[in-house]
Every structure is written in C-alpha cells, then in structure tokens.
Amino acid sequence: MSRVIVIGAGVGGLAAAARLAAQGHAVAVHERAATHGGKLGTYERDGFAFDTGPSLLTLPRVLDELFADTGGPAGLEVVPVDPVCVYRFADGTRLDMPHDPAEVPAALDAALGPGSGAAWEALYRRSGRLWDLVGDAVLRRPFDGPRDLLRLSRRLRDLRVVAPWRSLAGLGRAALPDPRLRTWFNRYATYSGSDPRRTPSVLSVTPYVEQRFGAWYVRGGLRTVGDALLARCRDLGVEVHLGSEVAEVRTERGRATGVRLADGTALGADLVVCNADASVLYGRLLTGPEAARPRRALRRASRSLAGFVLLLALDGRVPGPAHRVWFPADHDAEFDATLGRRPAPVADPTIYVHAPDDPALRPDDASEGWFVLVNAPPHDPGRGVDWDAPGLRERYADHVLATLAVRGEDVRDRLRWREIRTPADLERDTGAPGGAIYGTASHGARAAMLRPANRSPVDGLYLVGGSAHPGGGLPLVLLSAGIVAGLIGPARHHPDHRDPDHRDPDHRDHYRSGAARSVPPPRPAA
C-alpha cells in the first residue's frame, strides 16, 4: 500500500484522493483553508446561499463516472437547464438558447435573422469533428506535448480541422456572418479565462460540448458536489486535514518523499499529488533544480482572466431564466482591459447573472439571490490593478449595478444587501495567484493543449486541477483526477507501472451518452 499526500482539497484534490483511495492507497489530504472545495465555494448569510464558483455543469457523466468508480452514486440531483442562457446584445436583441441542440438553429434564425442557424450548424458540425479528434485523445489521457500534437495533426484533413494557425475569433469571422453571433461565439474563450483573439480555434469544441451534452444544474447548488466529494473521501478512509498548509514538497535524489507543513511538521509519503496552482508548486513548494524549466514556462505564460463578483440579496422574486448575459457594444475593449498591456477594471463589461430558482438557496419565496460576474484583470498591485486599493471595490460594484440598470435590469431598489468578491479575495481564499480563475490563459497556437503536465519532472509527484492538463472547469478538473489516478495505478502496482494510455473500456464512450443517470438524456443533435 502506497502512502499518498494530496496538497489541496479543491475538486481536483478530493477527486484524486477518492480515486486513489478506491484503488487501495492510503491517502491524506492537507488543505490550507478552513474549508474544502477550493474555487467551488459557497457564501451563506441571512438564509441566502450562493455558489461562488461554477454555476453550470457540462459533461455530467464525468461526475457520474467518478462516483460510480469510487463506490456508487452520490445522491446528487442533476437537472437540465432550459434555456441554457438568455443573451442580450447591445442593440437590444434577445437570444434564448435552448437546451436541445436540435432547436438551436431555429432559435438563432428567430433572434438574429435567417441564415444564422445554418451558419452555426455548419460550424457546429466542424466542431463535432474536432471533438472526435481531441475529446478522448487529449482530455482523458496524459498529453505529451509536441508528440501528441503531431499525432493529432498527422493527416492533412485533421490538420485543417485543428487549424492551429487560426484563433477562435478568426474562425468566428470566417464562419459566422452576423457580428452578434460572433460575439456570442467569442464568449466561450472566457470559459478558459482567455482572449478569443489569442485563443486557438480548437476551443470551438467548448460551445459544441455545451450543446451536444447539455447544460445542467445540481439541486442545492454546485457546492453540493464538493460536499459529496468530501463525504466520499471520508467513506473511503481518506484523512482530510483542513487548516493544514503545505510549505514544501520534500524530495530526495529526484523523487518526492513527502511534504513539510507550514508549522514545520515533516510528513513522509511514497507519492505526492498537488492540487495547488502549478505556479505555486513550481514557484514556491518545489525548490530543487527540477522546477526550473516548468517555472520558466509558467512565467512566460499570461495569467487567465479573473472575476469581479457581486452576491445580491434581493427583495421579491421575479421568475426568469437561471443564466443571463448582457453583452457590451465593444467586446474587444473588454479583453484589452482585462488581458492587455494596461489592465484596468472594464468600463463597459459583459455582465453574467446566475439566478437559480432553487428554494434551498433563499430564505423564502419573497426573495431571491443573484450571483453577478464580470470579467476582470487579475490582482497585481505592482504592474496592474490593485483590487485592495481604498474604495475601488465599492465604486466598481456601484458601476456594475448602474451598467446593468442602463441595459434594462435595475435591481438597486430591491437590494437588501450585497457582498463583493474581488480577484484579491479569490487569491486569499484559494491561493490562486492574482485570483486568476484558470491559472494561465490559453493563448497561442498550442497553449490550449499544453498546460503543465500531470506527471511532474520529479518522480512520484503529480499535478491535478485546473492549472494542469487538461484545463479548468469542473468536468476537466474531474478528468485530470482520472488521469493522475491512471498514471499512479492500483496500490498493488509499483507507482507509474500502469499504462498511461489505459482507459476502462466500459467508459470509453461516456462522452456520447449525454447525461447523468439520474435525469433523461438530451435528444441528439440533428
């Protein structure tokens, strides 16, 4: 039996711990914060409860698979979101995006005019071919950088689909004639915290996945996923130590031998799995020469988007879609402000609202809670925005609410109270440098598929979570845990003995099954 220490009780850390414990390892998790879940956070006050991290679940079978592999269903109630989102453009156009992908072309034609649906349908089919190339081949297995990129692009036909020379925004300009449709399409770069003008077109699989496999919500809020993961870990005998900060990964002769806690306690281990941000691991926790190369690579990469969040407790309850987005007139200016050379709070931001109709999240039926998010530059007092500057958070919160009012949704007279969460708060709460939600941005021809590897240069040290391969977002983080568990293998094997390309044949088609077992699957795309 191998002794495994997992650094961090975020989703990736807990999922890896559960998988490894189910494989027979003795696992202990050490988390610096006083609670679990990482970015899958929650805030509660006066009977209101808010998810402060992800608000939408895609690829729910990945979650279903995790619990099935570690002991059985978690008892989570996963339900479809329909419409997936209501979008409002600067010219007043409203687009209600259906849950069923077969209904999307007609919805686009109705909102944006004839031909919009056909243009998207052609791009949707192209993205489906791309998904066939990169889905299992990239997201469910370790990725060996240039070698695997070469394998994916070996055939000219495949190279044209992957199109590493084209940005997401460039693909939109070529395929989507309506500028509003391009604005909607470009938004999916922000799902990896990136600028669509610098994000490779391979990320066009993101809207495809959302439509093909559906958008879902977990009753009680997505924080319940973190609670269920913690419960599963404890059922499997995992030791979870909260308020226990790891200060160093200990190594000897090129192999991880354990960790040193912030209080000086040294803990031995056969294997270490790091759920902290990759830049924290290579910049602070790992001090040997093996960290030099990945440290340099991370320093060259740009940080991902951060987010400025308002949690609004509102009087009255106005039925409406759970997910709402208001776009500005100049989307490019938003990315210039957040990821450009002169970072600044966005003057005219895209505003996202999550307003779930969930009785578990409100004190009564005469009130409702809104999670409001705008894209923001990371916290960087030395070279960018100091989100702790006196008065900035309050002034910008007022500005966001005023902008929302200008766009036709004024909730200021309904406001009972508000809680403000800046990128600086996220950095303090989760350890994410600058509050960058996804670690590094997916900028450049290869960046989307060349995040830090799950196997580190140090034997016996692995990376899991959104800053490592295959990337950020709840399903990808869960997949990273599966990759790490596959690399390590069952306890009866020596570490690294398992074939890294191994995949359980019972799950090889899980992406195509559509939904969690607890709810009806979406109808297939036309």
Image (cartoon, helix red, strand yellow):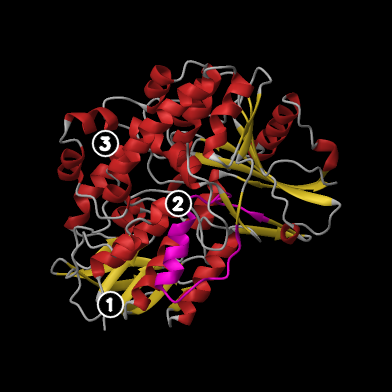
Q: To which quarter of the image does residue 265 belong?
A: bottom left
Q: Is the residue marked by circle 1 packed among few (<14), some (14-19), or many (20+) residues within 10 Å? A: many
Task: Determine if residue 380 is in view.
Answer: no
Mark 3, Cα crowd under 10 Å, few <14 / some 14-19 / many 20+, is some
Point 70% across, 60% down: residue:
44
Left or right: residue 180 versus residue 152 is right
Task: Examine the rendered structure and indicate whether residue 485 appears above or below residue 501.
Answer: below
Question: What x and y, as percent, mark residue 182?
Answer: 49, 22
Q: Label 1, label 3: how many angstroms apart (C-alpha)?
A: 34 Å
Spatial CA span between label 1 and label 2? 25 Å
**Rendered location of residue 295, percent (x, y):** 26, 48
- The residue drawn where x is 22% and y is 54% is 291
> Closer to the camera: disc 1 or disc 3?
3
Q: Which residues are magenta?
A: 50-78
Q: Which residue is mark 3?
A: 446
Q: Position of residue 429 (x, y in %)?
A: 53, 57
Secondary structure at badge 2 equals loop
Q: Which quarter of the figure has residue 66?
A: bottom left
Q: Is residue 49 above or below residue 68?
A: above
Residue pointed to by mark 2: 432
**Residue pointed to by mark 1:** 269
What's the residue at 44%, 38% (across, down)?
208
Q: Is there CB contact under 8 Å for labels 1 and 2?
A: no
Which amino acid does the dot numbered 3 rest on? Arg
State whether residue 17 is above or below residue 458.
below
Between 419 and 202, the one nearer to me in the picture:
202
